[in-house]
Amino acid sequence: MKVGIVGGSFDPIHYGHIQMAKTALQDLACDEVWFMPTKSTPLKDRSLTADVHRLAMIQRVMAYDDRFRLCTLEMDREGKSYTIDTVKTLKQKYPAYEFIWMIGNDQLAQFDQWKDPEELTSLIQFVCVDRDGQLVPTEYPIQRIHMEAMPVSSSEIRQGNKLNYVPYTVLGYIYEHRLYVENFIAARETRHRYKHSVSVAHLCEEMALANGLDGQKAYYIGLFHDIAKNMDVQHMEQWMDAICPENKKWAVPVWHGFVGSEIVDRVFYLDDPQIKNAIYHHVLGDDHDDPYAMIVFCADKTDPLRGYDSTDLINQCKADIYQGFWTVKNENDKYLEEGK
Ligand SMILES: [Fe+2]
Ligand SMILES: [Fe+2]
């Protein structure tokens, strides 16, 4: 039995990991690939997403190939996980198996910082997969193989970039459990608007639940409602030309609703028509039928961070969004009228 090991924090797992596993099967003739998630990474100080979530995401990928396995040896060990300890345990537990430890260029570049690198390479074969065409020099006896470029990292995904490199089932898990999602917003919005977005998200959720609606859906509408707000006008105009040139008749500050409703689908893969519709109408508050559109309009206007006492309005929306919406809308119209 020849086993390729793909180790990492898998925070989250993505197509780069999967491609590495396929390379082990196809190019190195491995019979199986074991995904080995770390408990904590000695070379990184960032705290990892809970083990239960990282495991669940890997588990969703196991169905892709019946030669994929999950190995929790490192996760089950107490304390920090060093590869040298793992390798020794593997050799002891499976004396008849041949193991190949797969690493990427980034890991090869830091290989001298691993614990006991000489001993490591004498115990087990390491193969470096070159995925960016760059040959990292190394003094260690490590085999190199080339793999088609897969320019993605887990840290990019945690910021909400390159989500097309995340298997659909894994992305579904991320949204279901709200992993990283507030980072997606923090990475794109000012601190002030980020706080507003998170606040509106929670308020939307509360209003939805109080009205017997889907709290999770409302949370995402609130979280993403201003996703296009900080976009520069030129960029926004390109989006408007592409998606709804007829709406350019509206003032520029209104556009972020139209553009945001497309971004949430095309960049973040939240392709729910109600999420899109609610974001689309949130600025004008001109959808008087869809309760989610009404909720985000009201939550946006009554966000406690706006600095006025909106408790009564919020309570009215929670009691009945169809009535509360008109109260908030009328109040808002009055406010705009007074401001003129
Ligand atoms: Fe907005
Ligand atoms: Fe807003």
Image: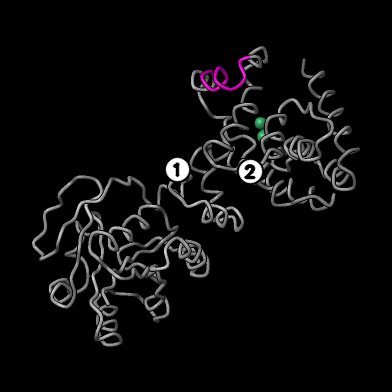
Q: Residue shown at 85%/43% (left/top)?
A: 317
- The quadrant the N terminus occupies is bottom left
Q: Is mark 2 within 8 Å of ligand 2?
A: no
Badge 2: residue crowd in 10 Å (few <14, some 14–19, many ≥20): many
Secondary structure at numbered mark 2: helix
> Separation of disc 2 and disc 1 at Cα?
16 Å
* In the image: residue 181, left or right of residue 151: right
Q: Nearer the viewer, residue 322 or 42?
A: 322
Identify the magenta region: 237-245
Which badge, 2 or 1, is on the more N-terminal residue? Answer: 1
Amino acid type, residue under disc 1 in the picture? Asn
Residue where numbered disc 1 is placed? 161
* In the image: residue 208, left or right of residue 225: right
User: In the image, which is nearer the foreground, mark 2 or mark 1?
Assistant: 1
* In the image: residue 339, left or right of residue 237: right
> Which image quadrant shows ligand 1?
top right
Q: Is residue 101 above or below residue 153?
A: below
Secondary structure at numbered mark 1: loop
Q: Residue shown at 49%/22% (left/top)?
A: 235
Q: Position of residue 117 (x, y in %)?
A: 16, 71
The number of callouts visible is 2
Q: Is residue 330 above or below residue 75?
A: above
- The quadrant the C terminus occupies is top right
Q: Position of residue 130 (x, y in %)?
A: 21, 52
The quarter holding residue 22 reads bottom left
Residue where numbered disc 2 is placed? 223
Amino acid type, residue under disc 2 in the picture? Leu
Determine contact: label 2, label 1, CB under 8 Å.
no
Q: Is residue 84 magenta?
A: no
Q: Is residue 244 magenta?
A: yes
Residue lying at the far top of the rendered structure:
249
Question: Dominant secondary structure of the magenta stretch?
Answer: helix
